[in-house]
Image (tube, grey):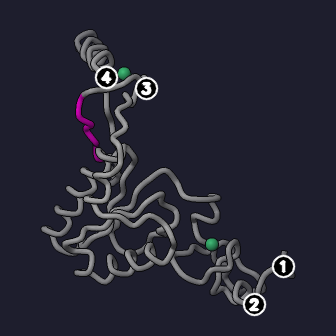
Amino acid sequence: MAHTLTLAQRDGVACVACNGDRGYMVPVGTLDGIPMFEHPSCAAGGPQEAILVVGDTTTPDGLASVTALAYDVASRMQMPTVVAMGRQYDVRAFDTVVYDETSYLDSIDSTVLWAEASEADMPVLTLDDLEEFDLIAECTWCGETADDDPMPTLIEGVWMPARFCGGCIDEAERQERVNA
Ligand SMILES: [Zn+2]
Ligand SMILES: [Zn+2]
């Protein structure tokens, strides 16, 4: 494979898959003692079904506001939603980047991620922009139409959206009574 790599790739400055030299990359081995790098999104073959939320998380108030924004995004978009902590994120690994208008320029990390996403030719949106998306009202369990509000749950740092139809809620409550 060595002869197919560009000079920048052989020097360890460009992604071995796309030859881009910007953004977050991870080491993928060495060639003649030089570490080679690749974007996680290139390794995975494209973006995952998840949203990255970018804003200033360096203060307790900032973190609380960005976390609340991520909750709103998860419930609006019905997609797993990650709060960016630091800048070690390959923005192109995500379907969409949503930024906190009030704080994204307040930290270097969030400014860099916002700029990388803007350069990456991917959707970079505010919460207001998301209002234009139609809500997907499908039950997370059975896929039937659900009419209740979605309730995202924070699991290992990711807001996981969940929306349940009346039938599944009744069934869950029945199970709980049985198991109690
Ligand atoms: Zn790449
Ligand atoms: Zn259901």
Mark 2, mark 4: which one is toward the viewer?
4
Which numbered dot is residue 165? 4
Disc 2 packing (10 Å; few <14; some 14–19; many ≥20): few
Q: Pointers 2 and 3 in contact (CB under 8 A)?
A: no
Query: Taking 63 as reference, is 9 above or below it?
Result: below
In what element is the residue under mark 1?
helix
Q: Is residue 152 magenta?
A: yes
Pointer 1 or 3: first along the chain:
1
Q: Residues within 10 Å of mark 4 (few under 14, many from 20)?
A: many
In which quadrant is the N terminus drawn?
Answer: bottom right
* Ligand 1 in which quarter: bottom right
Q: Position of residue 106 (x, y in %)?
A: 22, 81
Badge number at residue 143: 3
Q: Earlier in the sequence, mark 2 or mark 3?
A: 2
Cα separation between marks 1 and 3: 46 Å
Residue under label 2, please give it: 7
Find residue 180 and report its horizontal and vertical position in percent.
Answer: 22, 14
Badge 4 element: loop
Q: Residue at x 32, y 48 (%)?
A: 74
Residue at (17, 62) in percent of width and height:
64
Identify the residue at image location x=21%, y=74%.
Answer: 103
Question: Where's residue 143, x and y in %?
Answer: 43, 26
Q: Which amino acid, mark 1?
A: Thr
Above or below, comparing residue 158 to residue 99 in the picture = above
Closer to the chain start, of discs 3 and 4, is: 3
Quickly name the residue at label 1: 4
- Spatial CA distance of label 2 from label 4 is 56 Å
Quick check: is the Cβ at mark 4 less than 8 Å away from ligand 2?
yes
Pointer 2 with pointer 4, Cβ within 8 A: no
